[in-house]
Image (tube, rainbow, N blue to C red):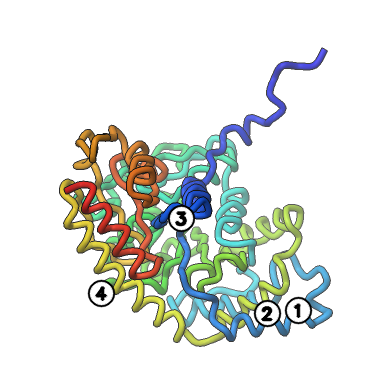
Amino acid sequence: MASSASAVSKRAVGVAASATLAITSQANALRAAGHPVIGFGAGEPDFPTPAYIVDAARIAVDDPAMHRYTPAAGLPPLRAAVAAAMARTSGFVVEPSQVVISNGGKQAIYLALQALLDPGDEVLLPAPYWVTYPEAIRLADGVPVAVPTSNRDGFQVTVEQLEAATTDRTKALIFVSPSNPTGAVYSRERMTEIGRWAADRGIWVLTDEIYEHLVYGDAVFHSMPVVAPEIADRTIVVNGVAKTYAMTGWRVGWLVAPQEIAAAAIRLQSHISSNVANVSQRAALAAVEGPLDAVTTMREAFDRRRHTMVRLLGEVPGVECLDPQGAFYAFPNMTGLLGRDLQGRSAETTMELAALLLDEINIAIVPGEAFGAPGYARLSFALADEDLEEGLTRLVGLAT
């Protein structure tokens, strides 16, 4: 007699789907059905990949060497280029052998945590956090330990908060600056303090630097192993080409780690996906070795849209929004809209509010629950200026 138990593994059942991808998919479906939906959910630049990068991929397609398996760790020239770029951009000097090329930043995070964690190991996770971090921790049989922050403290965690959340099972800290979803950028002083604390505690740091080139105003990007060299030999850096070069679909990221962790990640990748697609790697090589002119153009556009978004959100009664200093997201406090009459409807949570906004005024936002921050929402400003202004004008009209 067949078992009535589910055929799906407990591991798969326990993993939540990406809220950002789900919102984007829902918005696209409504748009395809003829609704004038404006999506603030996507975490990707709305620019095409620069032409010189696409040209490198075209050349790679005709290269027979790119039609074959290549090393699981990545193409040697790309690994060397990543190491050189890190030294040039942040001042962190590593060997190419410490670089592991992965299928996007998500796989880099997955590999790092699989290589680092044992069952029951705890990982400190400042909240709000990107939706993938807790799921990647759980997939490595680790335990995510959220450390809440808010708009009142600039969404920046303190050493005192981290210390209070630390136990004898704490193995690592995930640290992100510039932050997705909040746009917070840590000062050199605060980052140094956290890095030194982690070193003193013997805690590993996984630092995600995917938005390193997207900072605004007086904000400055810093790399933790540079400002706190004490933690360098217990740091894993994750990065990639997706955000900087508008290459989300090319799926090339990397992790940079001490040799033992890098070697473990290479072994894991050799069984998970062999090598990253060679044509994408050659495109990434052109990106990493090339100029940052296109990046400058994108950053200027994002900065302009950032100002527009903060201004219009400030016109929504009951909404508070800090100026994001990096990435391309605003993370407003929406609690002032909850429980209110919004043209005959109301929402008690930001999850319900997101559904209401999609139904009533056809704008798609990602509710804060997805980021461990109920009452907030993430809105991307990586969309056309006219769409951004139209969508937020709809929100102002609904709430006024």
Question: Badge 3, how many Cα within 10 Å: few under 14, some, many 20+?
Answer: many
Residue 224 position by quadrant: bottom left
What element does badge 4 sit on? Answer: loop
The answer to whether residue 202 shows anywhere in this view is no
Alpha-carbon distance for marks 4 and 1?
A: 40 Å
194 sits left or right of 253 in the view: left
Q: Which of pointers 4 and 1 indicates the residue nearer the eye?
A: 1
Q: Residue at x 64, y 63 (%)?
A: 102
Label 1 belongs to which residue?
61
Label 4 belongs to which residue?
217
Alpha-carbon distance for marks 4 and 2?
A: 34 Å
Alpha-carbon distance for marks 3 and 2?
A: 34 Å
Expressed as whole percent of the image width and height from the top left, the position of residue 100 reads: 63, 66
What element does badge 3 sit on? Answer: strand
43 sits left or right of 288 in the view: left
**Earlier-in-chain disc, 4 versus 2:** 2
265 sits left or right of 120 in the view: right
Label 3 belongs to which residue?
205
**Earlier-in-chain disc, 4 versus 1:** 1
Q: Amino acid at mark 4?
A: Gly
> Are the residues flagged by discs 4 and 2 in contact, CB closer than 8 Å?
no
Q: Residue at x 37, y 76 (%)?
A: 299
- Residue toward you, 206 or 233: 206
Q: Which of pointers 4 and 2 indicates the residue nearer the eye?
A: 2
